[in-house]
Image (cartoon, rainbow, N blue to C red):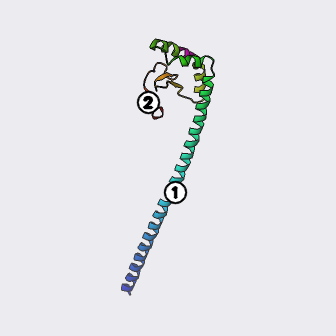
């Protein structure tokens, strides 16, 4: 009788362990599927947010460009840079800086950190955020300039 009781207890323990392992395995499998599904949803949402951000930044950049070229004397001054000597470029740079400093101050309040003018040869002409740094080749630094 005790032998039968032990066999019965052992049988229930084995059944319990097999059932527990099956439930655990099933739960882990579902947990990983749920985690992967949530990660995919989060990644899709993140991509959407990045696309929206980039679209809004492009709209802002286009608006800043359009309003910059409408500033009186800006295009006239900037068109002189290509044929200017180094000394003349410095004079023109200072004049353009004076023209744009009020605009840059306003843009900073709107979250714009960099207001940068570059020449067609990828040379940095004027960084409003670092006006003393200019003349470097941007094609080695930024992929979008190549």
Q: Is residue 13 above or below residue 92?
A: below
What is the x, y in percent for residue 17?
Answer: 41, 72
Which residue is under mark 1? 37
Circle number at residue 139 = 2
Secondary structure under the numbered disc 1 in the rendered image = helix
Q: Nearer the viewer, residue 15 or 92?
A: 92
By secondary structure, the bulk of the magenta-drawn segment is best described as helix
Q: Quadrant of the C terminus?
A: top left
Q: Nearer the viewer, residue 17 or 134?
A: 134
Q: Quadrant of residue 54?
A: top right
What is the x, y in percent for residue 90?
Answer: 48, 14
Secondary structure under the numbered disc 2 in the rendered image = helix
Magenta residue span = 94-98
**What residue is drawn where x is 49% and y is 56%?**
36
What is the x, y in percent for residue 113?
Answer: 54, 28
Q: Quadrant of the N terminus?
A: bottom left
What is the x, y in percent for residue 105?
Answer: 58, 22
Q: Which label sits in the foreground, 2 or 1? A: 2
């Amino acid at each position: 009788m005790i032998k039968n009781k032990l066999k019965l207890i052992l049988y229930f323990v084995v059944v319990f362990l097999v059932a527990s392992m099956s439930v655990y395995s099933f739960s882990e499998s579902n947990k990983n599927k749920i985690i992967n599904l949530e990660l995919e949803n989060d990644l899709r949402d993140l991509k959407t947010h990045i696309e929206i951000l980039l679209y809004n930044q492009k709209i802002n950049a286009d608006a800043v460009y359009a309003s910059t070229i409408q500033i009186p004397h800006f295009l006239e001054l900037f068109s002189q840079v290509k044929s200017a000597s180094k000394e003349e470029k410095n004079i023109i740079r200072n004049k353009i800086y004076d023209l744009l400093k009020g605009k840059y101050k306003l843009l900073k309040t709107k979250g714009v950190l960099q207001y940068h003018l570059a020449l067609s040869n990828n040379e940095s002409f004027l960084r409003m955020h670092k006006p003393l740094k200019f003349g470097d080749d941007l094609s080695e630094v930024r992929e979008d300039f190549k």
